[in-house]
Image (cartoon, coloured by chain):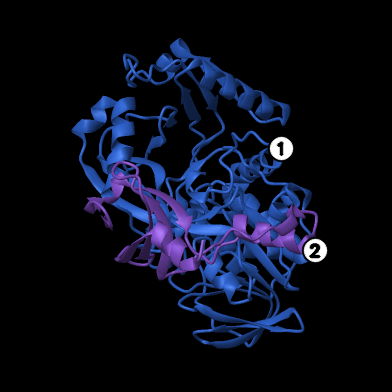
Chain colours: A blue, B purple
Amino acid sequence: MRYSLLALVGQALRGNTGWKPVWRDADLKPAYDVIIVGGGGHGLATAFYLAKEHGITNVAVLEKSWLGSGNVGRNTTIIRSNYLLPGNIPFYEWSMKLWERLEQELNYNAMISQRGVLNLYHSDAQRDAYARRGNAMRLHGVDADLLDRDQVRSFAPHLDYDNARFPIQGGLLQRRGGTVRHDAVAWGYARGADQRGVDIVQNCEVTGIRTEGGRVVGVDTSRGYVRAGKVGLACAGNSSRVAALAGLRLPIESHVLQAFVSEAIKPLIHSVITFGAGHFYISQSDKGGLVFGGDIDGYNSYAQRGNLPTIEDVCESGMALMPMLGRLRLLRSWGGLMDMSMDGSPIIDKTPVENLYLNAGWCYGGFKATPASGWCFAHTIARDEPHPLNAAFRLNRFATGHIIDEKGMGAQPNLH
Amino acid sequence: MRIECCYCGVRSSEEFSYLGDATVARPENPGGKTEDDAVRRRWHDYVYLRDNPAGPHRELWQHVSGCRAWLVVTRNTRTHEIVGVEAARDVALARGK
C-alpha cells in the first residue's frame, strides 16, 4: 500500500478500516542468500539497500525480540555530520544526504526535521578546536557556521549567558543537522525491505553460527537451523556475544548510555543544542518533551539501565546550560547498550571468517549513521569488499595502526 | 551501585573510577622484539581485544576519592550485582607478579 494524501482521504472516508500491516510477519525459510542478524535500524537498512541497490532479495532479518526494540528506539534522535577526521566525514555526510531523501525513498513519514545542531564553546581553546572542525567539514563540502556569542544569543536566547564558570562564547552550527522520529526509521526501512521481498522474522534469536572449512554456512536460531550464503551481524550492544559464536574476539566493550525526557511543555528549543563544558545535548520533541542525554555510565554493562550518579551528572550539565530546566519534572529515563569500540569509531567490514560480515562498534553515534551504515554494509556484503565510504572502518585497523580516534582518548572505551 | 572497598567499607560507586577488564595480562616481552609477528599479535590482543562477557566480569576499579587503592571487582554485567571485591595487589601477588 502506497501512502499518499489520496490514500489518507480514502481511508478516512472508510473509517480507517482498510489499513494493512506495515510489514508481513514472515515465516522462516530453510535457506537464504543473506541473513542479517539484528532487526534494528542498521540491520533493516542493510536489508533494504541489499534489495534496492544490489537486487538481493532472498534475505532474512532475524531479530531476537521485537523489531526496533534496541538502540534505534533508545537514542536521542539526533542526526548530524559534524565530524573532524577524514575517515569519518565523507561517511557521515553520505548518511546526511540519505536522510534528506529518506522519506521520499521509503514513502514513509519519519518526521525528519533539519532544525540545526549547535555545539557551544566556552573557551578560546575550544573555539579554535571548533573552527578547525568547521573548516575540516567545509573542506569536505559539509555545511558549518562558526557563531560568535551575539549570534548564539539571537539563535538561542534562553541559555545561561551569565554563567561565570562556563561562559558561552559562541558555537559551531550545522544547519542541516536535526532530529528524526527514530521508531519510524525502523518501521520505514522494515516496510521498504518487506515490499522488496525481504523476510523480517521477530522473536528469533541466533544461538549459533555454523562454519565449514572457515566459511559460514548457516545459523542456529531459537526457531531452528537456517542455511545462509552470507551472514551479516548488525547487533550493536551485543556484537561481542554474537561474534563469539563464530569464534571472534572484538575490540569492543558493551556500556550503558542513559537518555531522558521531561514532561511536555510549549515550544522552547527549536534546534539541537550541546553544552561544550560538559557532555550534554538537548532538543525538544514534537510532543513537547525535552529530550536529553550525556555521557555513558562508564562501566561494562548489558543491563539496559544505568545508575543515579550519571543522571545527577547529566542534570547538573543541563542546569549549567539552562537553569530553567530545574523547574521541569523528569518524565522518563532509559538505557541502551553501546558497542564502545577501542578508538570510538565503528567497524563495517568483512571478518576473518569467510562470508561473515560485521557491522559494529557504533559507540553512541549509531543512530545518525543508520542510512549510510546500511548502505555501506549492503555494499560490503554484496560485493564482498568495502565501499570507499567505509574503507576506513576496517576490523584490522587496530593491528595495522590506522585507528580513527576523534576524541584522542586511546584504547579506553569508556572515555570515547 | 555500591562497592565494598577492602579498606574503606561500602562506598558509592561515584567514589571509584573504572579501568576495565582485569583478566587481560600485559604480555611478556623478552628481548623487546616487537617486530616479531607473534609478539605484535600478543600486544594487539592485550591492548585492544576483550571478552566483554554478559554475566560475571572481573574488572579494575580505583577508589580515587578514598584510599586510592586499586581493586579487582567481580560484578555481573547483566544485573550490576557485585559478587566480590579483592585488592588488586593481592590478585597480582597471587598471580606471581
Q: Residue B70: x percent and y percent?
A: 39, 52
Given residues B50 and B28, the one toward you in this image is B28
On residue A128, the disc is none
Residue type indicated by callout 2: Arg
| Residue at figure coordinates x 75%, y 79% from the top left | A214
Q: Residue A172: x percent and y percent?
A: 53, 24
Q: Residue A52: x percent and y percent?
A: 70, 61
A173 sits left or right of B1 in the view: right
Chain letter belonging to callout 1: A
Given residues A311 and B76, the one toward you in this image is B76
**Residue where numbered disc 2 is placed:** A383
Neighbours of disc 1 within 10 Å: few (<14), some (14-19), many (20+): few
Chain letter belonging to callout 2: A
**Which residue in the rendered view is the most extreme toward the top?**
A150
Neighbours of disc 2 within 10 Å: few (<14), some (14-19), many (20+): few
Residue A300 vertical placement versus A243 (above, below): above
| Local SS, label 2 | helix
| Residue at figure coordinates x 33%, y 47% from the top left | B63
Q: Distance between the Cα atoms at labels 1 and 2?
A: 24 Å
Query: Quadrant of the rendered structure where residue B90 is?
Result: bottom left
Quadrant that contains the N terminus of chain A: bottom right
Residue B58 vertical placement versus A355 (above, below): above
Which is nearer the N-term, disc 1 or disc 2?
1
Residue B55 vertical placement versus B73 (above, below): below
**Residue where numbered disc 1 is placed:** A86
The reply to whether residue B1 is visible in this rendering is: no
